[in-house]
Image (cartoon, grey):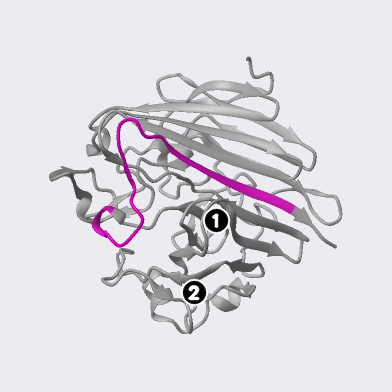
Amino acid sequence: MADMDATIFGRLADGRPVHTHRLEADGIAVDVLDLGATVHRVLVPDATGVTRNVVLGHGDPAAYLASSSYLGCVVGRYANRIADGRFTLDGVEYELTTNDGANTLHGGVDGYDKRLWTVHEAEPTRLVLGLVSPDGDQGFPGELSVTVTYSVAPGELQVGYAATTSAPTVVNLTNHGYLNLEGEGAWSVDRHLLRVDADHYVPTTADSLPLPGGIAPVDGTALDLREPRVLGEQLRLADDQLLLAGGIDHSLVVRGSGLREHAVLSAPESGITMTLLSDQPSVQVYTGNYLDGRVVGTSGRAYRQGAGIALETQHLPDSPHHGEFPSTVLRPGETFTSTTRWRFTTQG
């Protein structure tokens, strides 16, 4: 079905157009780019009825391609880090491209965020984008066929992932959207409140890789977000893990299983609350620690540390090297599926 709400956002260096696809339902409008399957804008009303764009984004395709911030895009084949750019599966070692020191981050040098996805279906409230990742892509085994489905309902954006493979491989897909519920051009998320339904987290090294021993209790740490915490206050706690990461950049293991509430983020200034639901085992909470003013957003303001917060529903980092973590292996005949929902509400 033709997408009547698609417009040309810009062009790639080879002339191919990048399109913006508008999805709308009561209380929400979402602009999705076929470049990187990127959530470019999310427009929701605040408590006074004024519409605010609550996600960070770039102004043109070239900026998205040049960026290492992964604003709003789908990252893969493996979100988060794989240590030393290699892993072993079924006795075979695979060497990956590295783009985070010696490690592989968000799929490698040429990840899915840099690809022009194919539009499979386009309707006023639903968009299906597809990508075929060839065998050996960034060193990963197997041809991976991926679809991402964005759909809107009143006040809600749902993201559905599906993937199949021609050979055993590892898969970890997520959206790397940054939220600022005061508005994309607001200075920071310091005044936001965050709660995460997680009793455990993954302590990390200075390279953001899991420490030996796997998960640890959040008790007594800055990662204890079981009650709503003011982000600016939490980020200024004396905590070695925050010091190593320059803020929060940690995987929190969400209690329970299946589609369930992961987190609640709210901005008292705007009255906007976002409730995050997913069926993934964890959420990577990232407070924009590496934003340094070199990226100028859609509002024309430079993004600095804390300009947005990413809540990335996914598997645990570096799982191929940690047998104690849930498996990310996908085999022929199986289908990887995952669902995440961003549910927006307002209160005066």
Return the x and y of residue 176 as percentages of the image width and height: 49, 48
Q: Which mark is residue 223?
A: 2
Residue at disc 2, secondary structure: loop
Of residues 117 and 303, the one nearer the viewer is 117
Identify which amino acid the numbered label 2 is placed on: Leu
Residue 347's image quarter?
bottom right
Q: Which mark is residue 78?
A: none
What range is drawn magenta here?
Answer: 320-344
Identify which amino acid the numbered label 1 is placed on: Tyr
Return the x and y of residue 242 as percentages of the image width and height: 43, 74
Q: Please name the residue shown 58% across and 21% down the image.
A: 121
Q: Please name the residue shown 43% across and 81% down the image.
A: 239
Quarter of the image with the C terminus is bottom right
- Asked if the residue under mark 2 is in contact with the one under mark 1, i.e. CB atoms within 8 Å, the reply is no
Quarter of the image with the N terminus is top right
Q: Is residue 235 magenta?
A: no
Q: Please name the residue shown 26% across and 59% down the image.
A: 323
Which residue is identified by label 1? 303
Q: In screen coordinates, is 76 left or right of 186? A: left
